[in-house]
Image (cartoon, rainbow, N blue to C red):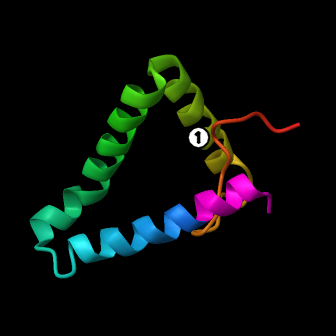
């Protein structure tokens, strides 16, 4: 794994722990909406940092990775900011 993907994996591990700490015993009504809210926060952050077109490109790359046979493993790191090859 190259250094950029390794750093991304490290940040993912940190975020996973922080997310687990956010709702250690969530009420059912909040837990149901948590993933949707988290994705909205992430996308809005990307739009602010990268712009709409780059965010759309990143989300397209993610959708493409998810659509591949076998999908993604839970700890998969997908490079969304650069083209492969």
Please check the rendered image and state whether residue 19 is part of the magenta-colored stretch, yes or no: no
Q: Residue at horizontal 24%, vertical 58%?
A: 34
Give 60 or 77, whichever is nearer the viewer.
77
In the rendered structure, the answer to whether residue 84 lies left or right of residue 61 reads right
Coordinates of residue 42 in the picture (x, y in percent): 37, 44
Q: Is residue 66 above or below residue 10?
A: above
Coordinates of residue 67 in the picture (x, y in percent): 65, 46
In the rendered structure, the answer to whether residue 8 lies left or right of residue 16 reads right
Q: Is residue 74 above or below residue 63?
A: below
Residue farthest along the right direction in this orientation: 85
Q: Residue at horizontal 10%, vertical 73%?
A: 27
Q: Which residues are magenta?
A: 1-9
Q: Residue at horizontal 57%, vertical 67%?
A: 10
In the rendered structure, the answer to whether residue 18 lies left or right of residue 71 reads left
Coordinates of residue 14 in the picture (x, y in percent): 45, 69
| Residue that label 1 marks | 63
Q: Is residue 36 above or below residue 17?
A: above
Please check the rendered image and state whether residue 8 is part of the magenta-colored stretch, yes or no: yes
């Amino acid at each position: 794994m190259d250094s950029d993907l390794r750093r991304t994996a490290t940040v993912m591990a940190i975020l996973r722990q922080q997310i687990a700490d956010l709702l250690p015993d969530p009420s059912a009504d909040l837990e149901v909406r948590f993933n949707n809210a988290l994705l909205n926060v992430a996308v809005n952050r990307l739009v602010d940092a990268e712009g709409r077109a780059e965010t759309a490109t990143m989300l397209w790359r993610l959708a493409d990775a998810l659509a591949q046979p076998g999908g993604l493993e839970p700890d998969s790191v997908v490079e969304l900011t650069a083209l492969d090859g």
